[in-house]
Amino acid sequence: MTVANRLMFEKPLGMRDTLPFFYNQKRKARQALSQTIESWGYQFLDTPMLEYLDTVGEASAIDETQLFKLLDQQGHTLVLRPDLTAPIARVAASQLKEQGYPVRLSYDGPVFRAQQIEGGKPAQFEQVGVEYIGENSIYADAEVIALQVESLKASGLEQFQLTVGHIGYVKGLLTEIFGEDHDTAEMFLRYLFRKNYVGFRKALQEVELSDRDKKRLTQLLSLRGEEDVLSQAEDITTNGACHQAIGELKQLRDLLEIYGVSHYVSFDLNLISHMNYYTGILFEGYAPHLGSLLCNGGRYDQLLPSFQSNASATGFAIRLDRLVEALSQEENTDEHVLVLYNRDTFQQGLQKAQSARAKGQHVVLQHKEQLEESSQMEARYTWVYDVTTGGGE
């Protein structure tokens, strides 16, 4: 068997086909998300799928090993966009800067991240999200989180939870404990980033620290839950950066209560996401039985300055494929109609199809004699009208 024949039905690693049912579910979820996002005053835009490695590629939060790279005719290294936040930051810092901040932007499109062979993860997937650029306040963080909750609810998802943390708290506590030993502090950050709590505890046993500091780092792993964990987190540190972070989280909690979405939110003071990217409040979203991250976001005040714009920013991204997986797999409620005709009854069949389409139904008009097996096709439809016999089902 030749290589060409062997690969005839194969796809590149991590790429997937989207079959009609899943495509339809994605379309519905995308539409519900978009309508909600637009109702909050966010404007959609699109950016190229190809960007320069030296600009957007380096500014992205995605590790370089996951970038798809290629060369243009001038020898410049390009990347397939690994996220949409960095490209939108580029646009906001250049083409939208003159209109003044803040700006509320949103997006919907595919991103590309190379995967390891054993990973089994998609290398192309679609994100729907927002970027609130140009406001450095808890009100902006609260708006983004509340909008994410309302967007997920609008898609039909009923059971989900957002976990909120603050990168300033974790880094502040590690600085308080390790001082100038940045390498050790970075090691513990990496364990938290990978959610490797076993490795964290093992490293804690091996590092030279006072019993008090070891106890505080052990307590850090347990700072998860409702608002009472904020007081517990405050009690184990005297660091000013930590107390400022807790103060911001308390303000956020109060605002989310006013929005009426606080029951979807819990706190995790050891939450880390993209260590060198987020600068303040950050959050992740999960749904029951999903097994993977549904959505995430947070404040990233250092991204716009890399595009020569001194602007703060916060936002979120929802994985559309995972949202569809999380939604209850109810059967499609759209009515699909099959109208069968022959050459003597085409006009009658066309009239029947047009009438059904005018009612919002999805109609296939099919020449009966061209079907290999009519019963197999008929089984896929809600209603079947066979005008060749003058009847229907």
Image (tube, helix red, strand yellow):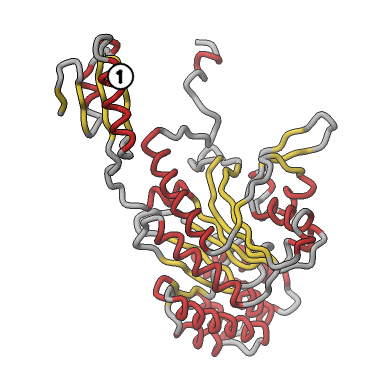
Where is 363 relative to 277, above or below? above
Residue found at x 53% / y 52% = 128
Mark 1 lies on a secondary structure that is: strand
In depth, the one of 316 and 334 nearer the eye is: 334
Residue found at x 79% / y 59% = 306
In depth, the one of 160 and 222 nearer the eye is: 160
Mark 1 surroundings within 10 Å by alpha-carbon count, few (fewer than 14), some (14 through 19), many (20 or more): some
Query: Does 380 sit left or right of 273 as displayed?
Result: left
Where is 9 relative to 35, above or below? above
Can residue 293 be seen in this snapshot? no
Residue found at x 60% / y 40% = 114
Residue 382 in the image, given as x and y percentages of width and height: 22, 34
**Quarter residue 111 falls in:** top right
Where is 255 relative to 304, above or below? below
Residue 66 in the image, given as x and y percentages of width and height: 64, 44
In depth, the one of 14 and 177 nearer the eye is: 14
Query: Does 376 sit left or right of 159 as displayed?
Result: left
Query: Does 27 sit left or right of 299 as displayed?
Result: left
Residue found at x 50% / y 58% = 295
In this view, the residue farthest toward the right is: 74
Count of picture labels = 1
Query: Does 340 sit left or right of 276 as displayed?
Result: left
Quadrant location of the C terminus?
A: top left
Can residue 242 be seen in this snapshot? yes
**Quarter residue 338 falls in:** top left
Residue 172 in the image, given as x and y percentages of width and height: 66, 79
Check disc 1 and report the residue beneath it.
Answer: 366
Residue 373 in the image, given as x and y percentages of width and height: 23, 15
Amino acid type at mark 1:
Gln
